[in-house]
Image: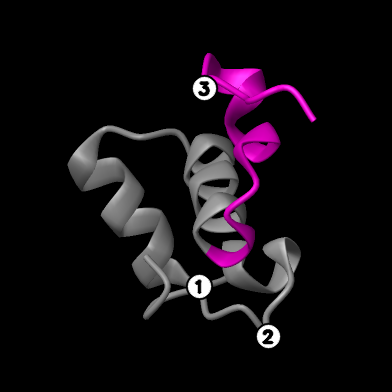
């Protein structure tokens, strides 16, 4: 994921990447959920996954 959508690209720029869209289609993951996982991978902040049922630790 981070190879196709590195951290220096915004979500909008990464969404324009056809390879990322194809990857998400192949693995059956919605693009917005993939971006949440990308934000988590970049930051380590579990709140990025909260919208999709990820567990977040209390601050």
The segment highlighted magenta reads 42-59
Q: Can you give x and y, in whole percent of width and height, for residue 27 in the image?
A: 21, 41
* Residue sticking out furthest to the top: 53
Q: Nearer the viewer, residue 18 or 10?
A: 10
Inter-mark Cα distance, 1 to 2: 14 Å
Inter-mark Cα distance, 1 to 3: 26 Å
Residue at horizontal 65%, vertical 47%?
45
Q: Is residue 4 above or below residue 51?
A: below
Residue at the spot of label 2: 8
Q: Nearer the viewer, mark 3 or mark 2?
A: 3
Inter-mark Cα distance, 3 to 2: 24 Å
**Mark 1 or mark 2: which comes first in sequence?**
2
Q: Are marks 3 and 2 in contact (CB under 8 Å)?
A: no
Residue at horizontal 56%, vertical 51%?
40
Q: Nearer the viewer, mark 1 or mark 3?
A: 3
Q: Nearer the viewer, mark 1 or mark 2?
A: 2
54 vs 12, left or right, is left
Residue at the spot of label 3: 54
Residue at the spot of label 1: 17
Q: Can you give x and y, in whole percent of width and height, for residue 36 in the image?
A: 59, 43
Q: Is residue 59 above or below residue 32?
A: above
């Amino acid at each position: 994921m981070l190879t196709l959508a590195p951290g220096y690209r915004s979500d909008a720029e990464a969404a324009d990447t056809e390879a990322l869209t194809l990857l998400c289609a192949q693995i059956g993951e919605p693009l917005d959920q993939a971006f949440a996982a990308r934000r988590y991978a970049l930051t380590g902040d579990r709140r990025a996954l909260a919208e999709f049922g990820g567990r977040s630790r209390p601050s």
